[in-house]
Image: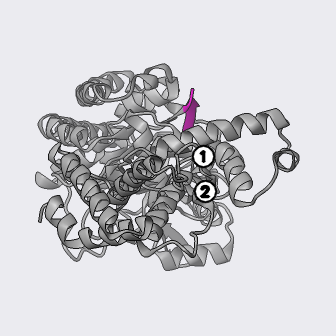
Amino acid sequence: MTYAEHYASEYLGAIFYYCLRKTGSEQEAEELSSDITIAILQELHKGTIPESFSAWVWKIAKNRYAKWADKKHKKNELFDGEDIAEHIDIADEEMNAEENLVHAETIAILRRELAFIRSDYRQVLVAFYIDDKSLPTIAKETGLPLGTVKTRLIKAREILKEGMDMAREFGKLSYRPENISFVNYVPKPGKRNEPWSLFEKLLPKNILLAAYRNPMTAEELSLELGVALPYLEEEIAVLEKQLLLRKNGKKYESTIAIISAEAQRKIFETLCKLAPAMEKKIEKFLALRDELYAKNGLRWNLGAQPEEDMRWARLMRATDVALFELSSPEAETRTKRPNGGEWDIIGYEEYHGDGFNFVGLHGSYESEAYFSQYKFGFRNIYKKTPEQMKGYLADALEAVCEGREADESAVRELCNMGYLKEENGAYIPQMMVVDARLGDIGDKGLPEEDKKTLSAAWREVVDSARECKEASKKILLAEIPASFMNDPIGKAIIEDQVWEARGAVLEFAIGNGYISYAENDPRFLLGTMITVNREK
């Protein structure tokens, strides 16, 4: 049905009744309704597409009636658009149904615009027009000079009138929010479990996403997200306080990088080509290291975990250490946040294409023990390992591995969890335990000739890691906003985004049989290690 057909079937009779009520004459009503109908059809013929057809029809009707009334020297009873006071009043009981409809739609538009006006203007508008407070009273309650209140009211009325005449459109994120995921760099979380407590809802994630590549004002964010400013401003304030948003002029911009789905796809394809060589070189290096340490009678592993199980942690450790050698000093600097936190994060858009299994690294925030556990997003391994080990458990585990006294209740808990096993009154660690005097990657304790041999193999690993890093870096730098180039910490974190290499190395190691994991495999300490000093 066309607009013209819709008008003829739904509005023609109501327009005539409206004109009859206004003119009091059937003949004049016919003439006026005909004039209104011709005006509406002419506008439609020009290609006009009304945002609200009903409001548009009645606006034309009232304008045409106003012109007719002027000719008859009657008082113009209609809203002239210069102020908003008449619109805030409750609809007149004597209005007919059509007039009430127009008034109701105007009120709806007014309320819509109030939702998009920032708080300092909205506060004065609501106080003056809705709460019926005088300007001196508003000045006293807000603590603002009277002149400032007057200026804000005038400016707010201008903004409101402009907005009421505007056809607003919500952005894509208003109806299709994205579920951004985050990778953390959290040596010290905040007292309220920041950053994770900040992203329990979609709104803060999408605020950061919206303000990432295109900085926006609060009003623009409100439209993009389809959220009224009174609610949005609270979330913006929290993100700004946590230094995740910053204001540049009137616009907000995200201070964290959010890697696009397209960049993730490109990095995946790149690592598919480069990471297999890196994985093979790590295998070669680990085998050579074991051979050299065995030849020299040096035992760097103090635990009871089987060799094949230890490979999971060793592969990831070698990957991380190689990448760490290539990182900039700024990448290890953490931003100081409120609530005592020192952390940084990076976001990832939802990506539904091919990718590697995620590999995270957790430890214990509450302990000084050098305990770590890789979290493999492969089959059912991830859910078997804790998010973080409690501090008292990590302390007890370290004490047992170093041959010191440990809290008995904590030791029993570690046994129940499988990290320790009791045999003949002694507690045996079931994970990889690295002797700090020899380490798990370097060449400590080896003769100089063997150090040179091992060093040459390690340089091959690092060179391969560099190739992966540089290729990933090129992809990321091509899409990040210019503002990040002036942020040493942010830029360093972006440039170091090759942690997908962990997943790539894992996948290719499984693919060539270096490690394996069955569908219902009971093992859960894969990727778990602790480094201890037996001399304590």
Counting every numbered tag in the picture gives 2
Span highlighted in magenta in the image: 245-250
Q: Position of residue 491 (x, y in %)?
A: 44, 26
**Which residue is painted at 25% across and 44% down in the image?**
261
Tell whether 160 sits left or right of 338: left
**Which residue is painted at 38% across and 48% down in the image?**
168
For residue 42, above or below residue 395? above
Q: Position of residue 120 (x, y in %)?
A: 68, 43
Residue 423 visible within the image: no
- Verify CB contact (< 8 Å) between mark 1 and mark 2: yes
* Residue type indicated by callout 1: Asp
- Quarter of the image with the N terminus is bottom left
Q: State yes or no: residue 487 in magenta.
A: no
Which dot marks residue 86?
2
For residue 447, above or below residue 72? above
Q: Position of residue 20 (x, y in %)?
A: 37, 70
For residue 245, above or below residue 85? above
Q: Main secondary structure of the magenta part?
A: strand
**Which residue is painted at 40% across and 22% down in the image?**
482
Q: CA distance from mark 1 to mark 2?
A: 7 Å
Tell whether 426 sits left or right of 210: right
- Secondary structure of the residue carrying numbered label 1: loop
Which dot marks residue 274?
none
Tell whether 200 sits left or right of 394: left
Residue 14 visible within the image: yes
* Residue type indicated by callout 2: Glu
How crowded pointer 2 is (Cα within 10 Å; few <14, some 14-19, many 20+) is rated as: some
**Which residue is painted at 69% across and 71% down in the image?**
407
Q: Position of residue 236 (x, y in %)?
A: 57, 47
For residue 29, above or below residue 269? below
- Secondary structure of the residue carrying numbered label 2: helix
Mark 1 = which residue? 83
